[in-house]
Amino acid sequence: MNSKKTPRRLHQFFDTQDGIKIFFISNFKKADPQRPVIIFNYGLVCNTTQWDKQYDFFQKEGFQVVLHDYRFHHRSSSGKNLKELTIKKIASDINELIKHIGAKKVILFGNSMGVNVCLEYMKRYPKKAVGAVFISGSIKPPKEVMFDTNLITYVAPFIEMIQHKLPRLFNTIWRTLFFNPLMIKSTLEQGFNKDLVPEEVIVHYLKKIGELAPGVFFQLFKEMNNHKIDSYLSRVNIPVLIVGGNKDKIIPPYLQRILHKKIKKSEIYILKEGSHMPHMEFAVKVNKRVLSFFHRNIEIL
């Protein structure tokens, strides 16, 4: 499996059945159907760069790998109706992507909201997933657990009301807010281990958020709060590695332990000093643990 080559990144597009152009990056044109394809799914209003260290590592280990942008995100196109941005639609897009590249077996990676996306895909299309890695995920509504408080339950509707009443002003503030030094400092301290993640990574992350329409955040935040997936967990029958950080202030690690308890073929790996993005902060440790998990649990040709 080990092929130490410079990481290959082919930029490609395909059109979904409902007319959305989906952007994706892969290290192949057409998948070898005998080998699994790793598909990375990012979190709420994130971008593909959060998976760079995983993409490069697993390509060098000989895996087929895919990064993709969700509909209404970055290089993928937007539809006419923001209500078409749902977790079910994203799962459907992934299914069409898998058909487009010719994959027969997939391994799903998800971070934060990406875990919801993975679970929805597994529930709706159960035949192709042979394994999964869930990082900093939760099946609980984020309004109840983010930052270990339900304060956002009251704050989010107020912010959305301002967006609807003063859209032009709100959009201007949204695009520029992320360059505010206080926002950069707050994001670094609340979402990351500030001793392990350079400030330029945070600036890039916030810049990419500012490129998205504010409605994308509010729509997907509602989707996460309304995503009923708990009853499916007992039916998950593929190996799942659950990863978290013991210093995660956004999705506290007890929520990963709930996932571990409910998914029978799961293992759990909580990183000391890890935050909401432990795969970025401790890439070497996480990548090695995931690779070991694959070799022990998944048939990889």
Image: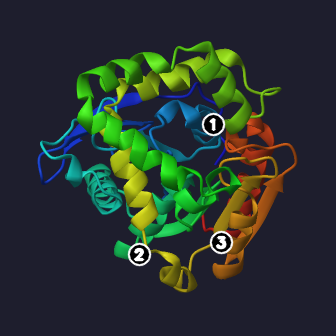
Quadrant of the image for the C terminus?
Answer: bottom right
Residue indicated by mark 1: 60
Q: Which residue appears at 73% of the width and 54% of the height?
A: 244
- What mark, if any, has residue 259 been given in the picture? 3
Picture coordinates of residue 9, whole percent (x, y): 45, 28
Left or right, residue 43 beside residue 58: left
Q: Is residue 181 above or below residue 256?
A: above
The picture quadrant where one finds residue 52 is: top right
Q: CA distance from mark 2 to mark 1?
A: 30 Å
**With respect to residue 203, does 269 lie above or below?**
below
Q: Amino acid at mark 1?
A: Lys
Residue 41, x across and y down, in percent: 48, 48
Foreground residue among 260 and 28: 260
Q: What residue would you read off at disc 2? A: 123
Give the distance between the C-alpha atoms of the residues marked 3 and 1, in whole angstroms.
30 Å
On the image, the x and y values in percent for residue 299 come to 60, 68
Q: Earlier in the sequence, mark 2 or mark 1?
A: 1
Q: Is residue 266 placed above or below 300 in the rendered structure?
A: below
User: Type of residue at label 3?
Assistant: Leu
CA gap, disc 2 and disc 3: 15 Å
Q: Amino acid at mark 2?
A: Lys
Whether residue 68 is visible: no
| 3 or 1: tag closer to the N-terminus | 1
Residue 198 in percent (x, y) is at 72, 19
Residue in front for this viewpoint, 29 or 68: 68
Decide which of 43, 27 is in the foreground and name it.
43
Is 1 displayed left or right of 230 in the figure? right
Compare marks 2 and 3 and give the one earlier in the sequence. Answer: 2
Q: How is the image coloured?
A: rainbow
Q: Badge 2, how many Cα within 10 Å: few under 14, some, many 20+?
A: some
Secondary structure found at label 2: helix
